[in-house]
Amino acid sequence: MPFIGRSMTRREDRALVRGEARFTDDLGAADDVPIVDAVHMVVVRSTVAHARIVGVDATEALALPGTVAVVTGADLAGTVSPYPVVSRDGATLADAPVEVVATGTVRYVGEPVAAVLARSRATAEDAAELVVVDYEPLEPVASVDDARRRVAVVHDAAPDNVLVRWSHRSGDVDGAFRDARRVARCHLHIPRLVAAPIEVRACVAAHDAADDLVTLWASAQDPWRQSAQLAAVLRRPEASIRVVVPEVGGAFGSKGSLVPEYALAAWCAIHHRVAVRWFEDRSENFLAAYQGRGMQADVELALGDGGRFLALRADIAADIGAYLYPNTPNVAVTTAMLMTGCYDIAAAEVRVEGLATTKVPTGPYRGAGRPEAAFFVERVVDVAARATGLDPVEIRRRNLVAPGAFPHDNGLGHRYDSGNYPAALDEACRLLGYDALRAEQRDARASGRLLGVGIASYVERAAPGGWESAEALLAPGGRVVVRVGSSPHGQGHETTFAQVAADALGVAPDAIDVRHGDSSAGPPGVGTYGSRSVTLGGSAVLQACEGLLARATVAAATLCGVDPADLDYRDGRWSRRDRPDEGVGLADVAAAALDAGAPMRADARFTIASPVFSFGTYGAAVEIDPETGRVEILRIAAVDDAGVVVNPLLAEGQVVGSSVQGVGASLYEEVVHDADGQPVSGSFVSYGIPSAPDVAFELETALLCTPSPLNPLGAKGIGEAGSIGVPAAVDNAVVDALAPFGVEHVDPPYSPERIWGLVAGRPDARAGG
Amino acid sequence: MIPAPFAYERAASVEDAVARLARHGEDAKVLAGGHSLIPLLRLRFARPSVLVDIGRVPGLDGVRDDGELSIGAMTRYCDVEASPLVAEHAPLLAAAAAEVGDEQVRHRGTIGGSICHGDPASDVAAALLALGATVVVRGPGGERRIALEEFFVGFLETAIARDEILVEVRVPVTSAPWAFEKFNRRAQDWAIVGCAVLAGSEPRVALVNMATTPRRAPLVEEALARGASAREAADLASEGTEPPSDANASAQFRRHLASVLVRRALERASR
C-alpha cells in the first residue's frame, strides 16, 4: 500500500512537544553559533508616520556603559544597495524599495532609524531610549483616500502615490454591461491584518573575516530569499553568504522577504567585527513586520437571463504602505488575476492600484491575495443572487466552470489546470446541511432569531511558477538521505517528503531522512510560500528518488552480474528473476558505492511552467444576537480539492489552522491607524486573534481529489485554504442573517458594535416595518 | 521588552512591607501577583525605582469564615474560584473570578492586586461591590477598614495610601440570588461591559467598565426597590455612568450593552 495518501503523524512533533526543538534565539555554541561574544542589537524606531530626519544624537546612548555602537542610516550610506523588487505578471512598479534603515525620511511609525549594539539586551534597550531623533514633521498619508488625494507625496518616484499598477481586460465587457438584464454591485473593504506568528522575527549574524563569509541564522520561511536579497543589499556574491533556518515558530507569509533588521544585523556584524543577535518583542512585530490584506474594491457583475454571469468589472485599491518589499506587489495582483473566481465569465476588466501610505508596508499573509479575491467575488455573487431571486447555491451552480471545460482560461491571465467545482459545491452543501439550515432559518426568523447561512466557492492559484530541487543519497546501511531546497517553517516537509520518497524507493518512510534549512548544505531552493511545497518540492523529491533508484538498480545489476532488466525490485531489495533467492539490498549497493569512492546519489530539479489551481467551497452558519450584535459561528463546512494529497492528516491540519485564522479575520482582527498614521492596535489587547475557547464551533472538513496534470504527484496546494474560504462564507452568512433588516453588506471584522449599528433602530422587515 | 532598572526587595511581613514603602515613598510599588504591574513595567509605562514583593509574606492568602468571609489579599483568583466557602457564601464572587483572563492569569493574579490596581474593567471588583465588601488596609498607623465603594477614587486610583498594604477583603455572607454577566469579544478578553447582580430584599447592582472606576448602579437598585420590572430598572443602568470609548466599543454602545446585561442578569437572578 502506498504511503502517498496515508495519514501519518508528524515526525517533527516529537522534538516540538518535548521542548527540544531549537528556534533561532535558542541557538548557541552547541549549534556552532558564536553566541558567547555576540552583542545584542535593539532598533530605534520612528515614532512618527512621516517626517524628515533632521538629526540623530547618540551621545548619551554611547556614554552608557556597555553600549558598543549606534548605527544610523548615514553609516550605511554608500555601502548597501536597494532591495531588489522586480515586477511579475506585468505589474508596473514605482521605485520605492524598503530600506534597511531610514535615510533622510521616515515613512511609518516603527521604521528603523538606528540600531544600538550593546553587551546585554537590557543595556541595549536602555541605550535605545537615550537615542534622540530630531524629526521635521511631514503630512501623514494614513489611508488610500489620503494617498489618492495626495495630501503628501510619499515617494518622489511616485508623484501620484501609486506604487503598483496592473490591469487586464478580455472580452466585450462594455457590450455585456450594456446588454445586461441586471448589474450586481458592491463596494468592499478588508482591513489590514497581522500574521502574529508565535515566534517573532529573530536572527543571529556573524562574519568570518578570514573566509569573508557572512552567516545568518534566521527565523524565516526559507533560507533562499533571505540569502539572495541579503546578497543584493550587502553587495556581496551569494556564495559569500550562508543562511541557516532552524525551527521556526510560524510565519504565515510574514517572513518571506529579507527582514531589514536581519540585513542591519549582518551589516553590523561585518562593519563592527562582532556577532550580532537580534530578536524583536511583540510590540515591534506589530509595528514593523509587514502586514497583510488592506484592500478595497468596487465590483460589478453583469447578469443575463437566468442569472448568467456575462461580465465582471473590478477596481481594486490596495493600501500598500510606505515601501515595497520584494513580495509586496504580488498580493494585489494575485487578487486581480483571480477576480473571475470559479466562474465561467466571458468578459472581464480588472484594474489595480497599490497606493503608498505612511504606514508599515504590506506583504503576503496566509492567503496573500486569494482571500481578498474570494471575498470580493463571492460577495458580488451573493448580491447577484439576491437581485435575481435565485438561491445562492443555485446561482453558483449555474455559473461554475464546467468539469469538462479544463484547462480553463479565466480571462485574467490564468489557465486553470483542472477542477470539478460543482462537486465541491455539492459536498459543502451536504456537509453543512444546507437545506436543513434553510428550513431552520425560516422557523428561526419567525421567532425573531437571526440565523444566517453563507456559501463561498474559491479557486486558489498555488505553486506560482518556479522550481525546487532535491538530492537523494544512499547512505551507509541502506538508509536514504533526502536533502531538499524546499525548507519548512511548520508545514511538515520531513513527514510528507519522506512519504513521497518512500513510495518512489519502495521502502518505509522510517528509512528516509529529510534534511533542509541550510543554504550551504544540499541543493538550492526557492522558498516556502504560496502553497507550493508538495507540488514543487515533493515532485523534486519524487524525481530525485526515482533517479536514485534507477542508478542503484544498475549498480545492483552489476553486483548480481545480470542485466538490470533481469532484476525485480521490492521493499528495498533486488532479486534475480531467474534465481529469486539471490539478490542484493540497498545496504549492499550503498556499501559497494562507498567502496568505489562514489556515493550513490541523484539530483532533480522540478520546474513548473504555470501554477496549479486548488479550489473548494466553504459553508458557514451563524447566529446573531440582535440585542448585542454578537456574531456566533455555529458551523463551518470546509471542502477543499488540492489534487492528490500526500498526507490527509496534515492537510486537514492546514485546513483547521487556516480556518481559525479565517475566523479571526471575520470576527476580531483589524489593524487600526489613526488619522496621523499612528497605530492604535499594537498589542494582543487591542488586536484580537482567536484563542481556543473562541473556536468551539463545529468544523467539518472534506478533501476531494481532482489531480493536477502539471506535476508527477498530481498535487496542488492546501496551506491557505481556510483563510480563503472562511471569511467569504462567514460574510455571506452574516449578511444573510441580517437580511430581515435590509442589510446588503457589512465589511469585516463583525464587531458587535458594527453589527448592532446595522440593526439598532432599523425596522425589522419581519415585523412589517 | 525589559523593564527599566529597578531595585527588588522582598518583604518578610506586612509590617516590613509597610516600613519599606514608608522608606521609599513615591518611588516604590507593591508587587503581588504581578499581572497588572509586570506588563506595565515591561512596556516601561511604569518605572518605579523599587519593587516591594509581598508574594512570600505569610498569612496574606486563604479564605476564612468568621461570620463574614475573610479573603486574604494574596489569594489567587483560582483559589477564590475553587474555595468551598466562597461557593457557599458568595457564589457571585466565585463566578466573577472564573471569568478573569485565562487559567494562567487566574493562577497568578490576586484578588488584592486587582482591587489595588483599581481597574474599572475588573470583574471581581464589580462582584465585590455588589456583595457589599469592605477592605482592610494596614499602614504605619495601624489598620483601617474602607468600604469598597469608597476605596475606588478615580481611574487606576484608590484610597490606599502609599505606605499602606491591603491585607484582607471582607465579604458579608449571603444566600441571595445572584448573576454575573460579562460581555467581551473573545472568551479571555477584559469585559467590554459587565454586571454583577445580588438580588434579594436590598438588590445591589454593580457595573464593569462603565466609568473611571468599578461602580454601582444606584438608580437601578432604587427602581428595583420600588418594585420596577427588570426591564424598567435595566433601562436606567447607564444613568450617571461615564463609559470609555475604545477600539472595542464606543461609550454609546457600552451604555446600550449595560442595559441589556443588567436586564439579563436580573432576569437570570430571579429565575
Image (cartoon, coloured by chain):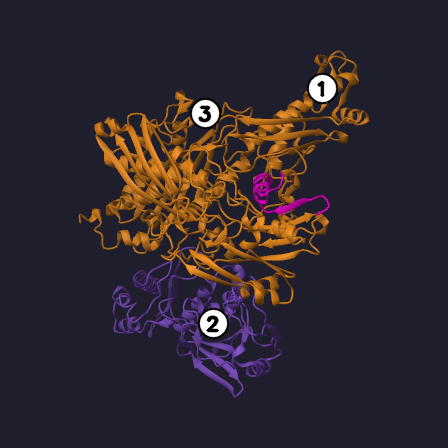
Q: Is residue A218 magenta?
A: yes
Q: Are marks 3 and 1 in contact (CB under 8 Å)?
A: no
Which residue matches tag 3? A417
* Residue A2 seen anywhere in this rendered image of the structure: no
Residue furthest to the left in view is: A768
Q: Are marks 3 and 1 on the same chain?
A: yes
Hue used for the chain lettered B: purple
> For the image shown, how many numbered marks are present on the structure?
3
User: Percent position (x, y) of residue A64?
Assistant: 61, 67
Image quadrant occupied by the N terminus of chain A: top right
Which residue is nearer to you in this view: B134 or B53?
Answer: B53
Q: Is residue A88 magenta?
A: no
- Magenta segment: A209-237
Which residue matches tag 2? B117
Q: Which lettered chain is shown in orange?
A: A
Q: CA distance from mark 1 to mark 2?
A: 75 Å
Q: CA distance from mark 3 to mark 1?
A: 35 Å
Which amino acid, mark 1?
A: Thr
Which residue is nearer to you in this view: A131 or A15?
Answer: A131
User: Percent position (x, y) of residue A71?
Assistant: 58, 57
Which amino acid, mark 2?
A: His
* Residue A705 seen anywhere in this rendered image of the structure: yes
Rendered view: B150 above or below A338: below
